[in-house]
Amino acid sequence: MTDHPPQLDWRAGDVPVSRRFDDPYFSLDSGMDETRHVFLAGNDLPERFRDGFQVAELGFGTGLNLLTALATWRATGIPGRLHVTSFEAFPMAPADMIRAQAAFPALAPVADDLAPHWTGTAQVIDLPDLHFTLLTGDARETLPAWDGRADAWFLDGFSPAKNPELWAPELMAEVHAHTAPGGSAATYTAAGHVRRALAEAGFDVTRTQGYGRKRHMTRARRPA
């Protein structure tokens, strides 16, 4: 995926922590449950799923959100394919990603299906129920060039305090521009400047209950 994968430390054996941003890739409590609460429920999923539903994501990380979304899609039994596009500046080495995913045995069937595709070069995965694209590079450059529009956004960059570029007003404006009418976005952060940037971009923004030790999170919807 990259000649220069991120430098990692590992906490509790299974939780990767970025040395660049000094931030864990997922919740130290339960990353899968946090994904379900923040990114699925925060976007009213799986209720809104339909054939061709487009998820877009800022921050691919370990691929946990992809695995959780696809597992949920499969559990609903909806025919057709889920489309996921993820933007990631520093893709993990395949072995590190697979190691991190192994922390979630409930997702093992999905992880096992995708593991052969993490070869270090694959950018697109096509399965009968999934079309996945990983766009590598600075999202400030790759997102404006994307020709898609998401039905739901997973805004999952590192902490705004440590990775401010991924939460800048200009990028939130691009998120809005690449959201279908009636589409949504969700993020674990409730930082005031992030909520303001989303609102200024044109989203209707609400602060709701967060997951675990995080008191609040943010939901946003583009008017239809």
Image (cartoon, rainbow, N blue to C red):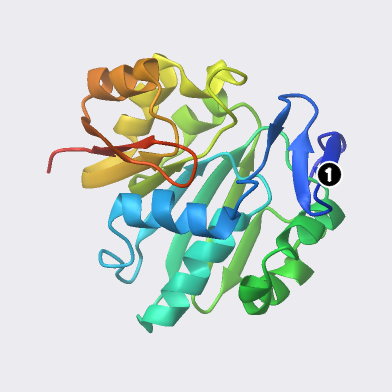
Q: Quadrant of residue 45?
A: bottom left
What is the secondary structure assignment of the residue under circle 1?
A: strand
Assign the C terminus to one quadrant of the image. top left
Q: Quadrant of residue 173?
A: top left
As drawn, the residue found furthest toward the left would be 224
Residue 177 placement (x, y as % from top left): 31, 31
Residue at (65% x, 79% y) in the render: 109
Q: Identify residue for label 1.
A: 10
Horizontal relation, residue 118 to residue 175: left or right:
right
Q: Amino acid at mark 1?
A: Trp
Residue 95 placement (x, y as % from top left): 86, 56
Q: Quadrant of residue 81?
A: bottom left
Q: Nearer the viewer, residue 167 or 179?
A: 167
Picture layout, residue 203 above or below residue 74: above
Q: Is residue 120 visible?
A: no
Horizontal relation, residue 79 to residue 86: left or right:
left
